[in-house]
Amino acid sequence: ADVLLGVEMMSTGEVACFGVDRFDAYLKALISTGYRLPKKNILISVGSYKAKQELLTPIRTLKQLGYELYASIGTADYFEANGISIHPIDWKYEQSETNSNGYENGNSHLDSPSMENNPQTTIADYLANGSFDLVINIPMRSAGTFRASSFVTQGYRCRRLATDYSVPLMTD
């Protein structure tokens, strides 16, 4: 999957489902594609302030349903300021040294992400270790045209890693 393409080229197929409302139909469409509902840990990264505002109620609902929520620093700051407990995680995608166990930054396998366990653990580490059941990544949008190189952002890399490690990804 190429997470750089526009909406008309993002998927390899289409699914249409009927339901009692659009939410029921959407859930049926997700399940019919093999999507699995997240069990525990969800990573959230939202670029624009407007998108963060729009997601405030759904994120609060995910927390009330018992999910452990993790987010990029800016996203975590916003939701924490709005009364939602969320664990901040740093991006830091730079190459790092590998220890004798094959993990970067001295990390061992992580079943549950926790900043308290290792403050050096990054989003890339968690994705590589299969610590997230779902990634919600909403990129910041701007007007105008862009060169392909300008799309290699923190969010792009997160979406790319989620795809590479077969972590379900929701984006706009």
Image: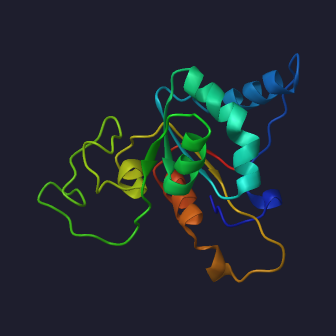
Left or right of 17? Residue 29 is left
**Picture coordinates of residue 137 (x, y %)?**
62, 51
Instruction: Work out which residue is located at the far left of the displayed protein and give it.
Output: 100
Q: In the picture, residue 168 is in which quadrant? A: top right
Left or right of 48? Residue 105 is left
Residue occupying the point 31% across, 54% down:
121
For the residue pair 49 and 5, the one nearer the viewer reads as 49
Q: Is residue 105 above or below residue 39?
A: below
Left or right of 84? Residue 15 is right
The reply to whether residue 88 is visible in this rendering is: yes
Left or right of 133? Residue 101 is left
Q: Is residue 9 above or below residue 27?
A: below
- Circle count: 0
Colouring chosen for the image of the structure: rainbow
**Picture coordinates of residue 166 (x, y %)?**
50, 46
For the residue pair 164 and 59, the one nearer the viewer reads as 59
For the residue pair 15 and 76, the one nearer the viewer reads as 76
For the residue pair 19 and 147, the one nearer the viewer reads as 147
Residue occupying the point 64% across, 34% down:
59
Residue occupying the point 40% across, 57% down:
124
**Picture coordinates of residue 97 (x, y %)?**
21, 69
**Picture coordinates of residue 161 (x, y %)?**
49, 57
Quadrant where the N terminus lies? bottom right
Residue occupying the point 54% across, 49% down:
77
Instruction: Work out which residue is located at the far top of the displayed protein and give it.
Output: 20
The reply to whether residue 168 is visible in this rendering is: no
